Amino acid sequence: MRHVGGQVTQLFTEADCGSIDDLRPRAISCNIPHVRKENRVTATKPLTRKLIRVGHSPDPDDAFMFYALAKDKIETGNYEFTHELVDIETLNRRAFRAELELTALSIHAYAYLHDQYILGTCGASMGDGYGPMVVMRKAQSIDALQSLSIAVPGKLTSAYLALRLCLESDFAAVEVPFDEIIAAVVTGNYGGQKIDAGLIIHEGQLTYGDHDLESVVDLGVWWKERTGLPLPLGANGIRKSLGSDAIHDIQRLLCASIEYGLAHRERALSYALEYGRDLDAVQADKFVGMYVNDWTLDFGDRGREAVAEFLAQGHAAGVLPTLVIPEFAD
């Protein structure tokens, strides 16, 4: 979907990109006034404004974060933001072409994109003792997963990398759109391919039980037991070619959008619920709380350590070809 001037239109996603191979906040100020559009005096806008194309997932936590920017609740100065809502694996793939100035990225995908994008310090999705899950019709042991056919939301997602690390081996992965994985596990089939288990992300973490599925492993729990750190799933990448001044400005505006949503939680949740699919209001509130929190306002030292450790373990396991030291915007 694309948001332009408050309107939403559907975009083509996978067909455009070819085949697809991832609480409460403390007070942080971004020095951006959080003023509702209807209550502010709008200054004369510059004749030419820099277009910032934003890509993020059509799920409640991302919608919550971008609410203020999507609905023109904060002043954006010399920048005009448009919004494209597509699944995370499509965004990961598009990022190789550096199409978008600001885009959600899986931390796994960032390992291949660090020369084109820098990570924003705000807007992260971290699983602090929870995260993507493997589910089955009848749970088996983690070791049994190595020989099963598992539906995954994309091979560039952080969920996929985490499962590779957890199993300490490759496995038979069938790529399935994230919002079709639960159905594929229930039926045991996707496009004629056998499905024994599914790697679920987003709201599926809260709804899989409604479909009589059982959890085999929560990768956020597994990672925290292994490292003592939160599992870094996603972040916002800002295109390096914009230059340091624009990168700084965009990061401040993104931070302000997140702060606005947290300060106007009920309105932001109402907007986010539009992208909740099977979630009711209570579940949407819980889901947003899981992924829009202190880590979202700022990675902090532990969050940065978690990203570096995740990428380092991916390289040590032979999944990532290069050891990548993450670079964060100032």
Image (cartoon, helix red, strand yellow):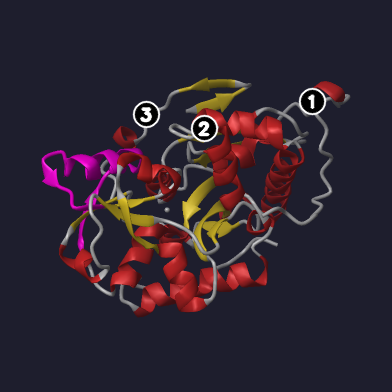
- Which of discs 1 and 2 lies nearer the camera? The answer is 2
SS of the residue under disc 1: helix
The tag on residue 37 is 1
Residue 60, horizontal then vertical, whole percent = 54, 38
Who's the residue at 23% across and 42% down the image?
186
Q: Which residue lies most toward the right here?
A: 41
Residue 263, horizontal then vertical, whole percent = 77, 41
The tag on residue 238 is none
Q: Report if residue 122 is visible in the image.
A: yes
Mark 3: few/some/many CA within 10 Å (<14, 14-19, 20+): few
Mark 1: few/some/many CA within 10 Å (<14, 14-19, 20+): some
- Between the C-alphas of marks 2 and 3, the distance is 27 Å
Mark 1 and mark 2 in contact? Answer it, CB < 8 Å: no
The tag on residue 280 is 2
Amino acid under disc 2: Asp
Amino acid under disc 3: Phe
Residue 148, horizontal then vertical, whole percent = 17, 60
Amino acid under disc 1: Lys
Who's the residue at 41% across and 42% down the image?
207
Specify which label sits upstream in the sequence, 2 or 3. Answer: 3
